[in-house]
Image: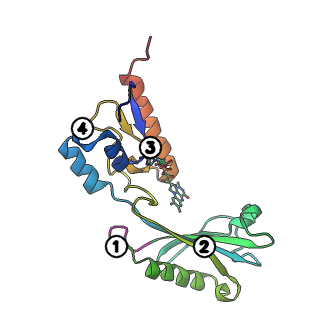
Amino acid sequence: MDIAAAAVISSAGPHATEELAHSQNLDRGYLKEVKEKVRPLSYISLEISSEKPLVDFPGVVVVPEGRRQMTMMCTSLAYPEYAPPGKHLLQAWAAPDSSFLPLNTAAEVDMVVQDLRDAIPRFDREAEILHVSYWQKDWPMYRALPGALTQKTPIENLYNVGDGVAPLVPLGLPACAETARIVVEDIKQRVKPAA
Ligand SMILES: Cc1cc2nc3c(=O)[nH]c(=O)nc-3n(C[C@H](O)[C@H](O)[C@H](O)COP(=O)(O)OP(=O)(O)OC[C@H]3O[C@@H](n4cnc5c(N)ncnc54)[C@H](O)[C@@H]3O)c2cc1C
């Protein structure tokens, strides 16, 4: 693909940027770094409905000492429209044992359900699991661990932004915004506006 521009910013992730820019245009050291360091993180998410709220706090609850690191929220206490009509919605999110091993999705989801049963004793009587999703590979939680790669590429003025090039802090969406801020600052210093 040919792009005539003073600077190009890609939010497609470092692997997709590499493909779009054609790997033969990028040096081997950088390609090795992308291959070794930009490894996606997995995540599991469950949507659960019930007649009454399964958790009575209208915010994110961290579940300590479970089989998996899990957070959950009775989303319908804050946003009733998220739930099926007349019902409540609990969302639970958990990280698997490892993102860097083949994901045994059935076993991982089972652990999360067991943690929900422990955290909510009336779970089996009152909960209906509506949807289970797991996020991995090309559809990950984050495209890379924070700090894996910088935003610059070996092609001058071709940048990556987003969670594949996140700094060490902050995490998640604030990290994506921070990568954009870093790139914009760099472009302002390096690229002169057209007269
Ligand atoms: C279930 C789940 C829950 C999460 N919860 C939170 C949370 O509570 N808080 C938080 O901060 N973060 C959360 N995250 C992480 C957060 O959503 C991501 O880190 C963030 O959305 C990444 O943004 P991005 O712009 O880097 O990538 P994306 O939002 O994935 O955007 C990349 C874009 O590039 C496009 N694209 C890809 N390939 C190409 C191509 N070849 N050509 C053109 N376009 C292309 C895609 O279509 C997409 O629009 C969660 C993620 C998941 C999966």
Select label 2 or label 4 by which is in front: 4
Find the magenta span and give its range.
Answer: 96-101
Amino acid type for the residue under numbered disc 2:
His
Residue displayed at 45% across by 59% down: 139
Q: Dividing the picture into quarters, in which one does residue 183 lie?
A: top left
Sequence-first disc among 4 and 3: 3
Q: Dividing the picture into quarters, in which one does residue 76 lie?
A: bottom right
Amino acid type for the residue under numbered disc 3:
Ser
| Mark 1 residue element | loop
Sequence-first disc among 1 and 3: 3
Rounded to the nearest angstrom, the CA distance separating label 4 from label 1 is: 31 Å
Sequence-first disc among 3 and 2: 3
The residue where tag 3 is placed is 11
Residue displayed at 44% across by 10% down: 195
- Depth order, front residue of 142/134: 134
Label at residue 194: none
The residue where tag 1 is placed is 102
Query: Residue 186 appears at what percent x and percent y?
Result: 38, 30
Q: Can I make out residue 69 in this image?
A: yes
Rounded to the nearest angstrom, the CA distance separating label 3 from label 2 is: 28 Å
Q: Residue placed farthest to the left in the image? A: 28
Q: Alpha-carbon neighbours of circle 4 within 10 Å: few (<14), some, or many (≥20)? A: few
| Mark 3 residue element | loop
The residue where tag 4 is placed is 25
The residue where tag 2 is placed is 131
Is residue 26 positioned above or below 120 on the image? above
Residue 97 highlighted magenta (yes or no): yes
Select label 4 or label 1 by which is in front: 4
